[in-house]
Image: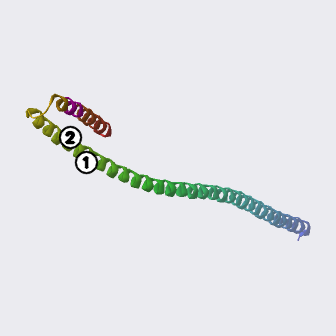
Amino acid sequence: MNLLDLSPLKSLVDSLFDHATSYDQEHSNFVDKAHEDKKMELISNAKERLELFKVEEGEKAKHVSSNKKSLEKVKRNLATLQGEREGLEAVLEAAKKKVEEVQAKILATEDEISSYEIMSLLTLKDSIRLEQKRECLEASRQDLTNYKLRLD
């Protein structure tokens, strides 16, 4: 019987499996380290973006706050101007009514003057003086009419 010595073969196979196991462990460690490095890089990049977004958020919040304050100031000014406008409108209406009242008085006085002119009781001097007053009255009425037109 011829026996073959298998011990060198066994030694080679054992060595092959030892090398394969060592390679697998080293490869696994390298892959794990590469994954961990990549993970750390991704986390670092995400944190950087997060900080940039937080800074941007702070700036935008300042702009919102500033714009809100400006809007509130404009609203206050608008309310003040609205009050002033209403006050001026009331003054304008009162002035128009006064002009109309004075115009009515002018017309009544003109009618009175006309009735006096019809009367023959006046002397020439009185008629001239009355005519001068009527002309002054007419000029005043015209001034008031022009004033009213400017108010409108």
Considering the image in quadrants, where does the N terminus appear? Answer: bottom right
Q: Quadrant of residue 110?
A: top left
Q: Residue at x 34, y 50 (%)?
A: 91
Question: The residue under label 1 is which amino acid type?
Answer: Lys
Instruction: Report the residue marked by disc 1.
Output: 97
Residue 13 makes an appearance in the image = yes
Indicate whether residue 133 is drawn in magenta: yes
* Residues in magenta, as a range: 128-134
Q: Label 1 vs label 2: CA separation? A: 14 Å
Name the element at disc 2.
Answer: helix
Q: Quadrant of residue 124?
A: top left
Count up the numbered dots: 2
Where residue 98 appears, as percent x and y from the top left, is 27, 47
Q: Nearer the viewer, residue 96 or 45?
A: 96
Instruction: Report the residue marked by disc 2.
Output: 106
Question: The residue under label 2 is which amino acid type?
Answer: Ile
Where residue 67 appears, as percent x and y from the top left, is 54, 54
Q: Nearer the viewer, residue 123 or 150?
A: 123
Name the element at disc 1.
Answer: helix
- Say whether residue 84 is left or right of residue 58: left
Q: Earlier in the sequence, mark 1 or mark 2?
A: 1
Colouring: rainbow
Closer to viewer: mark 1 or mark 2: 2
Q: Residue at x 23, y 44 (%)?
A: 100
Task: Tell me: residue 73, above or below residue 95.
Answer: below
Q: Quadrant of residue 22?
A: bottom right
Where residue 8 appears, as percent x and y from the top left, is 91, 66
Q: Nearer the viewer, residue 121 or 102?
A: 121
Task: Tell me: residue 28, above or below residue 128.
Answer: below
